[in-house]
Image (cartoon, rainbow, N blue to C red):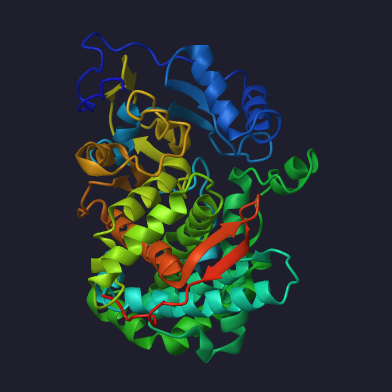
């Protein structure tokens, strides 16, 4: 393995020499951004888009344009500085260097109508802390219902694969509502059945201008999905139903936001929905299907190793909960490796607060105040200077002392895996919940099943071999 770099303070130069100009250009007005947009969405795709520019410039730091771009998004400045290695990527999580306000999804900001006219400033850490004890048991409760439904589907499908994505999204939505909103979706039949889809559409309309979908052939995707902002009116009715659900059934959480944070009632509800949708449901609904597909599609014998570890730890525990899964080193490492390979948020943005020197592994670059930095996480997490065989899924990568040392370079949330929440960066408090919840999912799968397999597309189970010795689901802590 190449010597792992020491991530230098961005106030010093990475190469020990003088800062050099950032390579790359933005091209001609209108034409340059349009070309980059078509390359990103159509001709190359995100991975190849960044890979080719990195090779052309001989640098992991360079200038380019990011969608949405001209000519359709008038007033949006698509110019960014791309960061593609661990050394430069770290600057995006230094609150003294970058400002993350209004750059959540990049060069453009979705209309405030999507959050009820409220400029959200989530109290995510408080919501998580107050509901920490209920989190494992509520997740296992929802997961039990989801797996029972998938088992029934698989047994009645005459050998056809049973899709798990929609049931899993319902599971995620249900347990998050109980933990974050403090309300059970079953209190409202419409929310119980369609609430997850309402949130999904609400997220999609805000993110579509920046996402390569692939389900629609080009040039239709460009013309229909990337050429204009979608109006809130398309999801206004659904948002109102979610708002009313929180208002009616989440009274305790709403009152706490009003009394402890000084928010008005409508501001409190809009903030809660943002936490539920963007911070929680959006990430889980992307990551957990990737996790199941990665393990269920493995053909290297990984599942047998995970099953052995999970059952060995559970034999010594009274219940399946966060404490138990924190002792499952291989399970945890496999979860980290999926996060490395498939980060739920592939793009991270930050705007430079002042002029500073940005180090990469091999050089240093001067960044000007106001420039927008864009980190492409799948590239940074495949940095060959940090990770051996970076393009390969290695479930044991984070096992042992050497593996744990790599966690300081694992960025998938709002900071490195070894980071701790601060007043300026409270969102990274969520990462422990995400990892622990993912480990709960894996452990429960192997408590319940001797084995499971996914189809080649990774979206459906082809086999669920139920164990004959499983204990009843526990209410973990």
Quadrant in the picture for the N terminus: top left
Q: Residue furthest front?
A: 468
For image coordinates 38% across by 27% down, the residue present is 85
Q: Is residue 122 above or below residue 195?
A: above
Query: Percent x, y for residue 206?
Result: 58, 55
* Residue 26 in view in this figure: yes
Residue nearest the observer in this picture, 182 or 393: 393
Q: Which quadrant would the C terminus be assigned to in this image?
A: bottom left
Position of 360 relative to 143 (above/below): above
Residue 346 placed where, x, y %? 48, 43
Closer-to-camera residue (138/190)? 138
Quadrant in the rendering for residue 367? top left
Would residue 351 appear left or right of 191 to someone viewing this image? left
Residue at the image position 48 percent from the left and 54 percent from the top:
291
Q: Is residue 4 left or right of residue 231?
A: left
Which corner quadrant of the image does residue 30 belong to? top right
In the image, residue 467 sits, relative to residue 372, either above or below, namely below
- 341 or 68: which is nearer to us? 341
Task: Report x, y in % for residue 465.
Answer: 55, 68
Q: Residue furthest top?
A: 17
Q: Note whether residue 413 is visible.
A: no
Give the number of marks. Answer: 0
Seen in the picture, residue 72 relative to 257 is either above or below; the reply is: above
Direction from residue 67 to residue 266 in the image, left or right: left
Snapshot quadrant of residue 204? bottom right
Q: Position of residue 210 (x, y in %)?
A: 59, 44
């Amino acid at each position: 393995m190449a010597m792992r770099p020491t991530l230098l303070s961005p106030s010093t130069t990475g190469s020990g020499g003088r800062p050099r100009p950032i390579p790359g250009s933005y091209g001609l007005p209108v034409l340059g951004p349009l070309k980059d947009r078509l390359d990103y969405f159509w001709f190359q795709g995100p991975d190849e888009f960044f890979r080719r520019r990195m090779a052309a410039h001989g640098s992991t730091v360079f200038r380019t344009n990011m969608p949405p771009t001209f000519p359709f998004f008038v007033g949006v400045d698509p110019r960014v500085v791309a960061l593609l290695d661990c050394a430069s990527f770290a600057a995006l999580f230094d609150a003294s260097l970058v400002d993350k306000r209004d750059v959540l999804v990049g060069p453009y900001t979705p209309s405030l109508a999507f959050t009820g006219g409220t400029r959200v400033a989530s109290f995510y850490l408080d919501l998580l802390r107050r509901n920490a004890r209920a989190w494992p048991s509520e997740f296992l409760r929802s997961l039990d219902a989801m797996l029972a439904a998938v088992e029934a589907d698989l047994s009645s499908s005459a050998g056809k694969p049973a899709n798990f994505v929609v049931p899993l999204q319902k599971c995620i939505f249900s347990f998050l509502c109980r933990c974050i909103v403090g309300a059970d979706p079953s209190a409202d039949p419409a929310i119980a059945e369609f609430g997850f889809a309402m949130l999904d559409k609400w997220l999609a309309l805000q993110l579509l201008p920046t996402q390569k979908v692939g389900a629609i052939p080009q040039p239709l995707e460009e013309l229909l999905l990337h050429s204009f902002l979608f109006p809130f009116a398309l999801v206004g009715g659904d948002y109102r139903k979610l708002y009313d659900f929180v208002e009616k059934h989440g009274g305790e959480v709403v009152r706490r936001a009003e009394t402890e944070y000084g928010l008005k009632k409508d501001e409190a509800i809009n903030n809660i929905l943002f936490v539920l949708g963007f911070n929680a449901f959006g990430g889980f609904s992307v990551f957990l299907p990737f996790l199941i597909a990665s393990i269920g599609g493995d053909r290297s014998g990984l599942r047998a190793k995970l099953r052995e570890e999970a059952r060995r730890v559970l034999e010594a525990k009274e219940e399946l909960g966060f404490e138990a899964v924190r002792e499952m080193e291989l399970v945890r490492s496999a979860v980290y490796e999926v996060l490395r390979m498939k980060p739920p948020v592939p793009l991270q943005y930050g705007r430079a607060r002042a002029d500073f020197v940005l180090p990469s592994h091999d050089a240093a670059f001067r960044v000007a105040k106001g420039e927008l930095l864009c980190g492409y996480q799948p590239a940074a997490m495949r940095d060959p200077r940090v990770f051996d065989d970076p393009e390969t899924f290695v479930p044991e990568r984070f096992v042992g002392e050497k593996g744990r040392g790599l966690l300081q370079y694992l960025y998938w949330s709002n900071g490195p895996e070894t980071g701790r929440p601060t007043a300026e960066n409270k969102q990274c408090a969520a990462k422990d919940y995400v990892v622990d919840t993912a480990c709960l999912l894996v452990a429960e799968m192997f408590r319940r099943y001797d084995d499971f397999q996914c189809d080649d597309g990774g979206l459906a189970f082809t086999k669920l071999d139920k164990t004959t010795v499983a204990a009843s689901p526990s209410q973990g802590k």
